[in-house]
Amino acid sequence: MRYSKQRDTVYEIVQSNPRHLSAEEVWELSKVEIPLIGFATVYRNLNALVQMGLVRRIKSVDGVDHFDACVMPHAHFICTHCAKVYDSVMSYQDVMEKIRMQSGENVEDVEIFIKGVCKDCQIVHNSNER
């Protein structure tokens, strides 16, 4: 595949952000670097990066795709209030090992999505109660 400044910019944005951004968020950040970049271009490049195996697509609770540059197996936390998606501290390796031990099956990949209320939403909720 040929070099593309747009694809390179999109990948850098996904790779450098600790939170897994939606296509719209990637587009907004891309416009800082490439002011005239279109949403369709960003989405097309995100899809190309997913197909190339460089980015993982994650569906959020609101149905919006989020993108993660870490394609190694790991757990994700999805906030049921704000729909943010980010890496969880939970070790997927523990789950894979437990399955292996209990079933004897050779587990190659595990997708773990932990859903709940993130710290930021808990703080907002608690401050609104006062």
Image: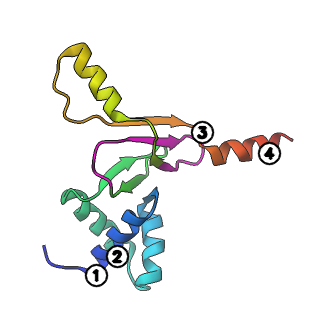
Q: Position of residue 65 (x, y in %)?
A: 39, 53
Q: Marks 1 and 2: CB-CB under 8 Å? A: yes
The residue at the point 23 percent across, 79 percent down is 4
**How far is disc 4 from disc 1 in space, using C-alphas?**
44 Å
Q: Residue 117 carries which label?
A: 3
Q: Which of marks 4 and 3 is nearer the N terminus?
A: 3
Examine the image and state in which quarter residue 107 appears. top left
The image shows residue 56, relative to residue 35, as above or below, that is above
The residue at the point 42 percent across, 76 percent down is 30
| Image quarter of the C terminus | top right
User: For the point 46% across and 40% down, which residue is it?
Assistant: 89
Cβ atoms under marks 1 and 3 closer than 8 Å: no
Q: Which residue is drawn at 46% across and 42% down?
A: 88
Q: Residue 9 carries which label?
A: 2
How far is mark 3 from mark 2, CA to CA?
A: 31 Å
Q: How far apart are marks 4 and 3 (CA)?
A: 15 Å
Left or right of 96: which side holds 82? right
Residue 81 position by quadrant: top right
Q: How far apart are marks 1 and 2 (CA)?
A: 6 Å
> Would you call the spot at circle 4 few (<14 residues within 10 Å), some (14-19), or many (20 or more)?
few
The residue carrying pointer 1 sits among few (fewer than 14), some (14 to 19) or many (20 or more) residues within 10 Å by Cα, namely: few
Which of the two labelled residues, at mark 1 and mark 3, occupies the earlier sequence position?
A: 1
Q: Distance between the residues labelled 2 and 4?
A: 38 Å
- Which residue position holds label 1? 5
Residue occupied by mark 4:
127
**Whole-number angstrom distance, CA of label 1 to CA of label 3:** 37 Å
Report the disc number at residue 20: none
Determine the secondary structure under disc 2: helix
Q: In this rendering, would 21 be left or right of 109? A: right
Rendered view: 129 above or below 69: above
Marks 2 and 4, the one that precedes in the sequence = 2
Stretch of the chain drawn in magenta: 70-85
